[in-house]
Amino acid sequence: MATRKKKIGIGLLGLGTVGTGVVELLEKNRVHIESRVGAQLEIRSAVVKDVSKARPGMPSNLKITNKVSDVTNDPEVDLIVELMGGFEPARTYILEGISKGKHIVTANKAVLAKHWDEIFQAAHDKNVDVYLEAAVGGGIPCIQAINDGLAANKISEITAIINGTTNFILTGMAQYGQTFEKSLKDAQAKGYAESDPSFDIDGMDACHKLAILSSIAFDQRVKIEEIHIQGIRGITKADIDAAKTEMNCTVKHLAIARSREEHGLEVQVVPCLIPHDHPLASVEGVYNGIVVTGDAVGRVMLSGRGAGKLPTASAVISDIIYIARNIAVGVAGKVPAVAYDVDRVESRRIVPYDEIKNRFFLRFTAVDQPGVLARIASILAEHGISISSVAQNERQKGSSVPVYLSTYTATEKSMGEAIKAIESLPAVKSGTLVMRLEIPENAS
Ligand SMILES: NC(=O)c1ccc[n+]([C@@H]2O[C@H](COP(=O)([O-])OP(=O)(O)OC[C@H]3O[C@@H](n4cnc5c(N)ncnc54)[C@H](OP(=O)(O)O)[C@@H]3O)[C@@H](O)[C@H]2O)c1
């Protein structure tokens, strides 16, 4: 029997918001955490960019360095926690750690989503673990829930709010009547959005997270290029009001992965209308929510803080605990690195964007004149698209007004072609807003 290891050495790469949170939380709850591991946890060193920066509150015995080799070559370091962010040098440092036989915990969704195969192959070859709870949903234990608690299920669907910035902006518009611009400014003032908010509001951050979530849930690698992305730019306060009054719905920016048995796996990050009684409708502000549907358990909902120093540190330390428990008893690397055996699973087809099937909620801008609505309806019908409701509340003869229209299920391809044909009508302006309608056909 392997001897129990009494002390587990940890090296941090990055000592910013999350890194300092990990140190603080480990100090605060040390007795409780170590009792769950059955061994002592020692953070031996932290790699930073600027060693001259003041680090208030950090223990005086913590070695702060700008040399990654101080961590990767330290024989007492068993696991490396990467909290630097970005693609490089994070990728190189993670691979270097793996090559030295160190287990890895990372919160870095960008490096994982892009370099998944390379990182997990290297980990598999060296029989080390890579844990990534904090990369999706901040403090929400969604990865462990899918990997462990729901492991008996075949998952058919994940629907999630996994970007706090877009959820904060949409909540500000829906609840406080703000414009998109004002709500974005508020998010920036509170530190929830970057000065260049594109990564969040154009959907790339949620895309990285959905790539990771679906690569875990559906037993196959899902690449960021395979995910259809539409951000929330162009959505107005009037659109959110129309969703409420016309459809009794709220607008959310959702990451959706849906397995359609014969068709394949649909993956998309898109603005959606969801009914007020949908579990994600009450997820507001910067909170995140993840709904997972399994064949045995049915629908499971997880929600909580999707970012922030201590919530994210909570997820990072849960990964440290998992790995440290295994190291302590000498069984690390006991499950395949991605929690399923890649050789045993047959990959599903990822449905190309054109073939993804959705219901739609559309806003056309059309001149208020007789016959325009009938023409729009007939073009949709020519493309095989059936309308479920129409609303044109403003009436200004001869000027442009918004026309809201919801449809039954159609492919993205036929909808794209229909919109192109409709926008070629002299009475219709370009810039039609397309949102998806997350209401099953038999429910409306
Ligand atoms: N913040 C959150 O709420 C949150 C939530 C979920 C996931 N995450 C993920 O957690 C990771 C860390 O985020 P964070 O907010 O803690 O970032 P952060 O506050 O910007 O901290 C980054 C840390 O990495 C160090 N660093 C950056 N580039 C480096 C380099 N080239 N060499 C050595 N050190 C380098 C920085 O050093 P200096 O201190 O010297 O600048 C800093 O200590 C990211 O992947 C992020 O996506 C964050």
Image (tube, rainbow, N blue to C red):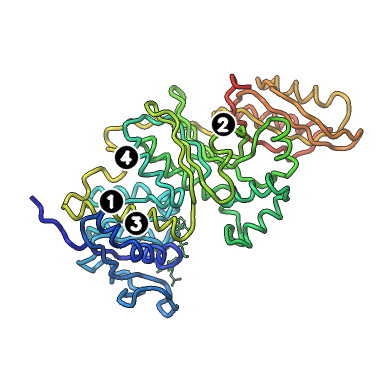
Q: Quadrant of residue 392?
A: top right
Question: In this image, 272 relative to 72: left or right?
Answer: right
Q: Position of residue 37 (x, y in %)?
A: 24, 55
**Gap between marks 3 and 2, in whole Å?**
41 Å
Q: Quadrant of ligand 1?
A: bottom left
Question: The C terminus lies in which quarter of the figure?
Answer: top right
Q: Say few, some or many: other residues with alpha carbon within 10 Å of mark 2 (under 14 / 14 to 19 / 20 or more).
A: few
Q: Which residue is mark 1?
A: 322
Precedes in sequence: disc 1 or disc 2:
1
Q: Tell me the kind of residue under disc 3.
A: Ile
Q: Seen from this angle, which residue lies furthest bottom? A: 52
Reading the image, the residue beneath label 4 is: 148
Judged from this view, the residue extending furthest toward the left is: 1
Mark 2 or mark 4: whose residue is earlier in sequence: 4
> Which residue is identified by label 2?
354
Q: Earlier in the sequence, mark 4 or mark 1?
A: 4
- Please name the residue shown 77% across and 26% down the image: 376
For label 2, the SS is helix
Q: Nearer the viewer, residue 230 or 152?
A: 152
Q: Circle 3 is placed at which residue position? A: 317
Ligand 1 within 8 A of label 1's CB?
no
Residues under labels 4 and 1: Cα distance? 12 Å
Q: Residue at x 28, y 46 (%)?
A: 337
SS assignment at label 4: helix
**Which amino acid is tagged 4?**
Asp
> Marks 1 and 2, how far apart in space?
41 Å
Q: Few, some or many C-alpha atoms within 10 Å of disc 4 (few <14, some 14-19, many ≥20)?
A: few
> How far apart are the alpha carbons under marks 3 and 1?
9 Å
Earlier sequence position, callout 3 versus callout 2:
3
